[in-house]
Image (cartoon, rainbow, N blue to C red):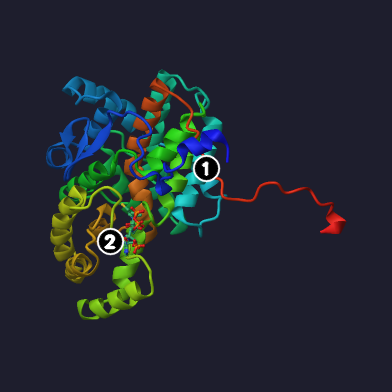
Amino acid sequence: MSEQLQEYEGALDRGLEGVVTCTTSISTIEGTTLLYRGYTIEDLAANATFEEVIYLLWYGWLPTRRELDEFCTDLHHSMALPPESFGWFHGLPTRVHPMDFLHAVIAGLTLHDPDANLVNAAATLRKSTRLSARVGTIVTAYQRVRSGQWPLQPLPEKSIAWNFLYMLKGEEPDETTVRRFDTCLILHADHELNASAFSARVTSSTLSGLYSSVMAAIGTLKGPLHGGANEQVARMLLEIKSPDRLENWLDNTLRSGEKIMGFGHRVYKEGDPRAKILKRMSQEITRENGHPELYEMSVRLEELMQAKKGLIPNVDFYSASVYYSMGIAIDLFTPVFATSRIAGWCAHVLEQYQNNRIYRPRGKYVGPTGEAYVPIDER
Ligand code: COA
C-alpha cells in the first residue's frame, strides 16, 4: 500500500457517511428540521410558492415582489420547449421509463442551447432557468404522447405547479390541488448533499456544464434507494392491497432481507420533517379522492416499522399516496421529484462553480499486487 494510502488507513467510510466534502449555504438538516437558506421547511411549505423557493435557493434571499415578478416572467416563458424538440417526442420510444425519457430529452436540449458548455455564472443561471422550467413540460408531454395525445403548451401567466397539472391532465386544475402540488415541489426542492446533488457537484467540479451535471443527477435520482423509492412505495401499497394483510406481508418481506421502500434515512433518525407535512396531506387527499385505505395502510406500516425496525418514514413514503390520489401515473412519481429537485441541483452547480475544486477521493485498494503479465496462449 502506498504511503499516502496508509495515511488514510482507518478513514475508510463506505457511502461517505459523516464525510464533509464542501461548504454550502443552500440547505441543511438542523435537528429535526430542514432549512433552505435559513428558513425552515415548515415555514416555506406553509407560506411560500415554489417559484419563491427556487429564487431563494439560487440567489440566497427571498425575492421582493418586483424581483419575483421579473423572475417568474423569465421562468414561466421558458416552460415551452423549443419547437424542434416536438419532433423528438414522436421519434423516441414511448414504452421506456419516464426518467430515461427525461434524460434523453435533456441531452437533446443540450444540442440546441447556445450556452450549453459555458460555465460562467450568468450562462449557468440562464440555463438553470430554462431547464428548471422545462422538466415538468417534458414529463407531462411524455405522458400525453404515450397516451396517444398531443402535448399541451404551458401558459406563462400560470405557475409551474399549475402548468404541470394542466399539461398532464388537459384541464385546468382546481386551486386546492395546485396548492398541494406546489407544496410537494417546495418539500422536494433541495436536501443538502443528497446523492443526486452530490452527483451534480461532482460532474460540475470537472467544469463540465450544467446540462451534464443535471443529467448525472437525474441518473442518480432514478435509483430506488434515492428518488425512485416513491414509485416503489406506491407499488408496494397496491401489492399489499388491504390493512389486514399488512403485518404478514411485512414480516415475510423483512425475513427475506428486502428493504421496505420509503423507510430509513442516512441523516434523520428522529423523523423526516417533510414526511410529517406529507402525512397530513395524505390523510386529507386520500379521503377526499376515495383512497382512504392507502393512508390507513401507510400509518399502520409506519407503526410496525417503528416497532420492528426502529425506522422512520422518509419523504418518499407519504408522497406516494399523495401523488396517487392526485391521479398521477405511478412511474411519473420520480419525474415529479425531478421537476422539483432540479431547483436544488442548479443551486448546487452554481455554488460549486463559485469555489471549485475537482472531487477526487481515493479508494482503498484490496486487490492483488505483483502480478506479471502472462501471454494469452499460456493462460
Ligand atoms: N427497510 C428495511 N431495513 C432497512 C431499511 C428499510 N427501508 N433501511 C435501512 N434498513 C436497515 C438495513 O438493512 C441495515 O441493516 P443491517 O445493519 O442489519 O444491515 C440498516 O438498516 C442500515 O441501513 P443502510 O442501508 O446501511 O442505511 P443507509 O444510511 O446506507 O441508507 C437509505 C439509507 C435511505 C438508503 C435506506 O434506509 C434505504 O435503502 N431505504 C429504502 C429506500 C428509500 O426509501 N430511499 C429514499 C431515501 S429518501
Disc on res. 296 = none
Query: Which residue occupies 35% across, 45% down?
Result: 17
Q: Distance between the Cα atoms at labels 2 and 1?
A: 42 Å
Horizontal and vertical percent position of residue 101: 49, 50
Horizontal and vertical percent position of residue 227: 36, 51
Ligand 1 within 8 Å of disc 2? The answer is: no
Residue type at mark 1?
Gly
Query: Which residue occupies 50% across, 24% down?
Result: 115
Against 145, residue 299 (above or below) is below
Against 188, residue 39 (above or below) is above
Position of the N terminus by quadrant: top right
User: Which structural element holds mark 1?
Assistant: loop
Which residue position holds label 2?
324
Question: Which numbered disc, 2 or 1, marks the residue closer to the eye?
Answer: 1
Tags 2 and 1 touching, CB below 8 Å: no
Residue closer to the observer: 73 or 51: 51
Which residue position holds label 1?
363
Query: Which residue occupies 47% across, 32% down?
Result: 359
User: Which structural element holds mark 2?
Assistant: helix
Q: Is residue 379 left or right of residue 50?
A: right
Position of the C terminus by quadrant: bottom right
Residue closer to the observer: 314 or 185: 314
Residue type at mark 2?
Tyr
Residue closer to the observer: 200 or 294: 200
Residue 30 visible to an observer of this rendering = yes
The furthest residue to the right: 377
